[in-house]
Image (cartoon, coloured by chain):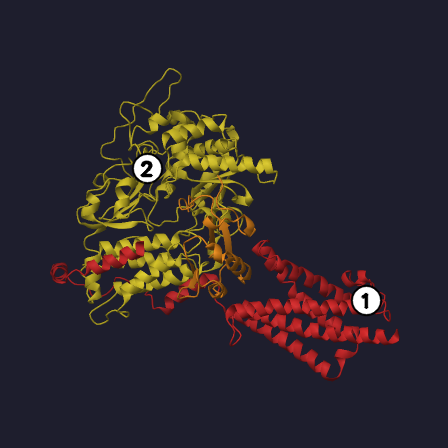
Amino acid sequence: MPATSTANEPAAKATPASTRLRVNPIACSGHGVCAELLPELISLDEWGYPVIADAPVPVSLLKQARRTVTDCPALALTLARRCLPSQAAADR
Amino acid sequence: MHYSSVVLWYTSRATGVVSLVLLTAVVVLGLLVSRQRQLPGLPRFGTVSLHRYLSLLAVGFLAVHIATAVVDSYVSISPIAVVVPFTSAYKPIWLGLGAVSLDLMIAVIGTSLLRARIGRRTWRVVHWLAYGSWPVAIAHGIGSGPDLNSGWLLGLTIASVLAVVAAIGWRIAGALRASPRARLVPDLLATHGAHDPAAIGHRAVMPTEAGQTAQAAYPAKTTALHAKIRAVQQ
Amino acid sequence: MTQRTEDHPRISSPRHQAHPIHQTDQTSQTHHPSQTHHPSQTRLLPPPDQPIIDLDAHLAWFGPLPYRGTPATLIDEVKAAGLTGRGGAAFPVHRKLSAVLASAARNKAARNGRARPIVVGNAAEGEPASAKDKSLLLLAPHLVLDGLQLAAQAVGATEAVLYVGMEPASADWLDGLIGQRQATGLDRAPVRLVAAPPRFIAGQESALVSRISGGPALPMFTPPRVFERGVDGRPTLVQNVETLAHLAQIARYGAAWFRAVGTPDEPGTAIWTLRQADGRVEITEAALGTPVTRLLDLRDTQAVLVGGYHGAWLPAATAAELSLTNAALRPHGAAVGAGVLAALPASRCGLAETARIVRYLALESAGQCGPCRNGLPRIAAALADLATVTPDRPLTDPFIIDDLARWSGLVQRRGACAHPDGTVRLVASALRTFSGEVDAHLLGRCTAASGEPFLPVGPGPVTEKDWR
């Protein structure tokens, strides 16, 4: 039963309709670089942590999204293809 | 041939110095990024970008520094000795340190170029090698030639060392002062004056009958409350 | 050895219980609660004050342990039975079994050294208000251990772990039982006992995996899910111990028997921790779909906490109309959850109760994720402020409701686990259910007669060691 594909897919495989930006909240230390690089999809909450839009990444922003993932100082961002809608919501 | 050798030799020394200065800046910027600070006037990604671009620039100068040293026939440094430490005919120890520093740098910069593809933990561990690469490079610079031991270049060396030592000291101080993770929530609760659990509930209460009358008297502002709660639940 | 039941709540029989009919069938003479004419609701728990500890007595009462041979037969039976997890998430058990089995097969094909699955029985029970798992282990431990073996066989695991949050004395006793089973050759997969620290989230799936793998009981970022990479990187099946006990009975008596009680969508029984308004704490077993009033005495009750500290408060009048299924509870923002039902006496202050619980929940945050470690303490402090107003010391923050709403929105779905989400669910339900009390407090008054604590909370962790 495949879950979401693991992080760091080469972008060529990611189809626009299903590519989502995700943050690893444990790794994230609130640098805030991501919100500067991708303000269309990422904003910061009042404590400095990223709030990511819950929508697929538009094609026009894919390249910038990939750059944002690479530039996160904590490597906390991933660009992942979603294979299954969250069956992960259960049994957390 | 003697003339071109002198040109090569001076080019190597000059680019070596420039590389060292650039690497000092890279280390200091890296420490700034790790403590989530900005350079004044630059956005946060600017500090990150500068850190990375300067490291690539340093590699460029380093390439010239190494190439000219190898090509120069005045000293015998084989290409192998560039990456395999302590195998050079000329000053094997000091040049060996340069090779060590270069190897570490290749690991650091190589993994950073591929950082989106390797795991987060792997990248972090390798990046720590940078702390080894820089002092080894300084040692290589001081021992390989007389340049850094006198004059304004000595001043440059001292300033570089001071800058890195200060930056590392600042980083360590920050780590020491930071609350351990287990204290983060209790400290925040205390800051907001969260009463200890024994105190919650011990305050002026109204007798039940009076309470019921009072409850009836207060109009329920529940509509607005429910709307807010519904918005949260979405 | 007679198990003393003083250390844990009194076991009560549901009022309508028919004692198990001892049925003899052609193949064996056994005394077990399997019967089709008068399906009993007390299936897991032995008769009150008669724990089944002795292995022979256990096998005599329930029947022999029916190893199946092939995983598929048991998984199909479990699917037909419709067994869902009893740890809080109510996830279909057959899907978990299949997922672990498939993951192990994939790893075997890939030859990556991670083909040996492992099963874990989860009895961490970090919920202070719940005592059902500890009680089950003290009263019918062999059912749980049977289930562990059957689950291991079903996924092809040759090792099992029992993850318990218990005092050392009880854990040692369990270890003895495990040793006894091993010695008689009944257990095919060796069982290892691992202590869970007394943390609220110690039973969370990835925290459990982290602890068993030798680290602290802190949640980890997923993906990968534990059925893919869990303990030591291997496919891991995690099941609550009550779920395993049900599994052990389904394997013996079949899916049709399991479905004889409960509802078509939520079949079977569950064990409930009941906290009555007069202070009595009881453990009982009742079918899903049982009306709340059958279990809780709602006289002198203003509200009922359903599910646990990640559950929801419901007004007593609402609760009185409901039966215990997720289908009935979900429209009211509640769920069966960890099987806790607590009746808040009319004289208490629901806000004070909630403020105390939320303060505990904030302290029990792992502190790994920015939104949770920032949001939960602020929510807790605001609730504490609201709960402790007096006419002389009114609210510090006049925008408290707006702040609570904003922080609640900011912490949901932004952590590595569901701790902030569950906490917000409780807070929102409290503001709804105790809205009259909230109005009074906003004006500096409390209408309750007593601010005394009713529900238990723990002290919270102090150092890193408290997570191991």
Chain A drawing hue: orange
Asked if residue B29 lies left or right of residue C261, the reply is: right
- Per the image, label 1 sits on a secondary structure element best described as helix
Residue B122 picture location, percent across and down: 60, 55
Q: Mark 2 points at which residue?
A: C270
Residue C374 picture location, percent across and down: 40, 63
The quadrant in which residue B206 appears is bottom left
Asked if residue C2 lies left or right of residue B28, the reply is: left
Asked if residue B86 lies left or right of residue C392, the reply is: right
Quadrant location of the N terminus of chain C?
Answer: top left
- In 3D space, how far apart are the residues under numbered discs 2 and 1 (Cα atoms)? 78 Å
At horizontal 42% and vertical 63% (from top left) the residue drawn is: A43
Residue C397 picture location, percent across and down: 28, 69
Camera sees residue A31: no
The quadrant in which residue C265 appears is top left
Please identify the residue farthest to the front as the structure is shown: A60
Asked if residue C190 lies left or right of residue C271, the reply is: right
Between C391 and A91, the one lying in front of the other is: A91
Circle 1 chain: B
- Say which amino acid is labelled 1: Val
At horizontal 77% and vertical 72% (from top left) the residue drawn is: B12
Q: Mark 1 points at which residue?
A: B70
Q: The red chain is which one?
A: B
